[in-house]
Structure formats: structure tokens, C-alpha cells
Amino acid sequence: MDLTLKKHGPVKPRALERRASSPLMSLLHTASFETLDRATQATAARFTQGISPHAQMSAWIDWAAHLAESPGRQLELAIDAFSSAARLAHFGAYNLFSDKAERPFAPEPSDRRFEDPAWNAFPFLFFEQAFLAQRQWWRKATREVRGMRAHNAARVSFLASKYLDAFSPSNIPWLNPLVIDRTQREGGANLLRGSKYFIEDFFDAATQSSNGGDGYELGKDVAATPGEVVYRNHLIELIQYQPATETVCAEPILIVPAWIMKYYVLDLAAHHSLVRYLVERGFTVFMISWRNPTAEDRNIDFDDYRVLGVMEALRVVNAVLPGRLIHAAGYCLGGTLLAIAAATMARDGDERLASVTLLASQTDFSEPGDLMLFVDAAQVAFLEDMMWDQGYLDTYQMSGVFMALRSNELFWARAIQEYLLGEREHATDLMAWSADQTRMPYRMHAQYLRGLFLENRLTAGRYAVEDDVIALKDISVPMFVVGTESDHISPWRSVYKAHLFTDNEMTFVLTNGGHNAGIVSEPGHPGRRYHLAVRARNNRYVSADHWRERAKLFEGSWWPAWASWLERASAKERVTPPQMGAPEKDFVPLEPAPGSYVRQR
């Protein structure tokens, strides 16, 4: 069967037909008062980095108003405050005479701020306990009050914990024993170095530049797996990687990365590169490298990423390897897009896929975790107005949200280490990638936030592609889905919900680590482990927690398990590696990997 069907010919870039309209010209040439409102909102959003003050204030008002009408909860909190104060006072008095007093308050298992033995000495131990007492009380105080919206309760609890974290004794130089000791031993030299680092970082932020990737050069230290760019359109470059074995699996792999960051999180330094690992296992690998959009790309929409991205890449892979089925893999937002593309292909009778792999990718957004605390109708409207004015969502506006989700690890811990202790964190390949950020076009991101994140249309039977609704259950090819235990962006239980909306054979893997480190999980990395279980076609649904109890636990990286799964889903006979590109079909190598789009700033 020839899978390179004529109907899959080159697509016309619809996004380029839509002319970018200037918000200022709209304001001058229309009598729309709404335009004035949006321009005002956009101006405010620039000062708040896209965080809606209304969204935060409305949550606090909802909580305060219902708490004011709940005398029982008020009495409970008053008794709890008195009890905590008494326990803290008893602990403090006891510690004046003995260092064996039992601590009344314990930090969360993931809280590492007070791990150093220096915190065990008095009075620093008392400072720690006083902070933990406040944190515990506010956690109880911000529980949902009967009658208030659950979303507002979660947001208030989150905001309260972040405000408290700012005043943790670990962040205050004269209350932190590590900072005090370092300052005494160095005579304040650590603070001078820290001030220098702070000034450098301040000017980097002001100029929207970063030195986080110092020491890592694109194409040499990262994104260095040999290959060629064999296709380019306005939105993507398609990289074909050079074979590393004499024979390869007949079916190639097409990887669809997220466009929220650069593609090479999957092609870091050689020992961390998933792409290099696959090539060395005998796979022919293609990778999409997304364009970094500018204000001129404001009207590129979400479906353009499917058409100009996934479908065009499939067309080129079919030209290089005619008649071959394709293993498609998507990471994060790229996985969501791939699921939509696969469901659309299944609906239309397009049978070019051999399998679908989703890496830390959500298809259902009803329980998206802490990230949902930043998304509601008010917040989305606020972001839309800012993007409408700019033409895109900027990198620093996006990174602030992710930093807020893990402020202790990503902000405060780094600030203490660099600005107070005077120790610059050594750059890693993952840090270099994290500092190499991208923008997202206005129309696409607005459609994603509303259609998927806010309204959850994909699993609600309301997501239409080309004016016809698609369904994930139409996907019949085997799926391999990976969730990560500590994921704050795509919580694993949300990723697991792909079981609810599909009937095909599905292998689900739960690996330790976070959204990035759990995926970049090379063999030999110490401390790696994963659960794995297979759902046969049309099997009954098992809840996420029950699945975890029953799934087999393996030590090590999940990469070999995926590679073996891909081999089993491929033809048994290995073949000679294909040529680079398809010159006879005008797909000639344009330049060596990593290409030009990955270098765009």
C-alpha cells in the first residue's frame, strides 16, 4: 500500500494569508470602545507580567467573604492559633535548657530549606518552627469554606504559601545560619560577590538576555547529534539525523517537540540526548524544529501548527521513506498537538502512523494541576489583551509562571546560593536549554488557553478540526504514554487520563523526576525508576492510583523500555539506512543540524 497519497500534498500556509493587524490602527480606524478596553488592559498587563490582579483579588474576596459568614470556622482557626502559639512557646522555653525537645511542626518531605544541621541549633531552630507554625495555620485557614468556589480556594491557598515563602527565615540573611557563618568566615566577601551576581542578572533581565547557557554552544555541546535540515517552511525546519548503525528499523520516528521551548531538550549533551540514543539503537529519527515567532506571526493559529507542522513533516518523511509507516512521538504541548493530529488522521482514514507516543503530554485538562491556578476566564482575557497588543507571549512573561509554581527550588534557593552565599551555580546542558526561550504567537496561544486549557474541548467532544469534531477513541494504533511523578506542568494523573478517552492498546509509564528531568532520563542516571503496565485493547478502566499499586516497578531509565516497545511495533526485518532527504522529490539537505530556526532569538 502506497502511504504517500496525493491528497497529502503540500499545504498552503493559511497563516501567511492573514495579514497582521496593528492594535493601534484598529483603535484609530474603529469606533470600538472594546478596543480601548483591550489596549488599557494590555498596558496594565505589561506591568504585572501578564498576571491578572482581578483574578487574584477575586479569589481573596471570595475566601474572605465566606470566612466572614462562618463563625464556626473562625472559632476553629482561633483555637488552632492559640494551640500553635502555646506549643511553640513551650518548645522555645524547653530549648533554653535542653536540645532534646520534640519539634511540634515538621516541614513537608519535599521542603529542603532546613536540611542543613546548622538549623538544629538554637535560636535558628525556633525561627524554623515559628515559620512552619505559620505555614501550617495558613494552610488550614485557606481551606475551602462552604459556599466558595473550589478553584478560588486552591488559588488562595497557593498564593498564601508563596507569600509566606518570601518571608521564610532561610531567605532572611540575619536569620539564616548558613549565611551568617559564611559572612563571618569570609568577612563579607560572599555578599560582595552576591551583589555582583545580582547586578549582572538584573541587567540580563532588563535587556531580556541570559547567560544561563554559558559554556554550551549549539551544534557543538548541545543539539549536536549529526543530521541535516531536509525541509523548511514558515513554521518548521525538519531535521533528519544521520544513521549510526549499518542497518535500521524499517519504520522511522518523527518527534514533535513543544514550541514553548527549543526542541533540543531531547538532544542535549551526548550522554543526555534521547535523539542520539535512538539513532544508536538503529532508528531513523526526524525532529521538528519550530520557528521562534515574532509580532508578524501574530495570526498563526493552533491548527496551523498541525497543518504546517505535523502534517507537513509527515509528508516529507513519506517522501524520504515512501510506503513506510511512521512512529510519531510528541513531548508536552507537542504531544497534545500530535494526539489531535492522530485523531484527525484516524477520522479521515489516513493510516500512515505505526504508533503514537506521548511524553508528559495532556489530552484532558480537567485536572491540570497547579498551572490551572493561573488560568481562569479573567486571567485568559488579561493574557489575550497583552498578546493582542504585542503579537505574542514573550519569554520572560511565560517563565515567571513556571518559576512561581516552584519558587522555592527555582527562585529562592538560587537567590540564597548566588546572592547571599556568593556561589554561582555551574551551568548544565539542561540549564542552557532552559535559558534559550521562545515566544508564542497571539492567536495560537489564545486558542490553546481557551479551547483546551479553559474549556477542555478535546475530551468533551467539542474540538473540531476543519469543521468536524474529532475523538481520541478513533486512534487505533498502539500508544506509549509517559507521565512523571513530580510534574507541575502536566501532572501524571492528568496525563494518565488518556486511558479514559481511548480504547487502543496503551503502555503507560510513570517515571520519577519532573516535567523535564523525568523525560531526560538516560540509562545509567543514578536513582532512576519507573512503573510500567500495559492496557490491552478494550480493557476496563483502572484508576490512576490503583494502576500505580498494580504496575510493575523497574529500576533504571525508561528509555530502553520505549526503544524495545518501538522495535516490537516495527517490522522484524531491518533495512539499509535511507539517504538524507529525497533529492529526486526536491527535498534536498539545506544545512547541517541543528539548522537556523533553533538559533532565532
Image (cartoon, rainbow, N blue to C red):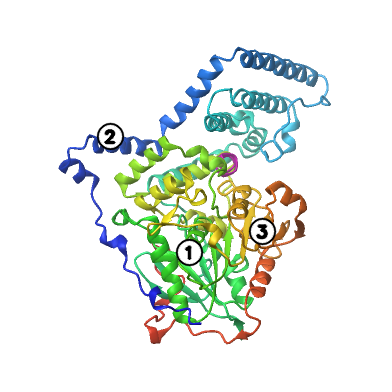
Q: Which residue is mark 3?
A: 508
Residue 408 part of the magenta-drawn span = yes
- Under mark 3, the amino acid is Phe
Question: Which residue appears at 57% of the width and 60% of the height?
Answer: 358
Question: Which residue appears at 57% of the width and 43% of the height?
Answer: 367
What's drawn in magenta, residue-wise? 407-416
Q: Which mark is residue 37?
A: 2
Quarter in which the C terminus is drawn: bottom left
What is the residue that sits farthest to the left in this orientation?
29
Looking at the rendering, which quadrant does residue 158 occupy? top right
Q: Nearer the viewer, residue 185 or 469?
A: 469
- Under mark 2, the amino acid is Asp
- Can residue 92 be seen here? The reply is yes
Q: Which residue is mark 1?
A: 347
Q: Secondary structure at mark 3?
A: strand
Q: Which mark is residue 99?
A: none
Q: Main secondary structure of the magenta part?
A: helix
| Residue 198 higher or lower than 94, as above or below | below
| Residue 580 higher or lower than 171, as above or below | below
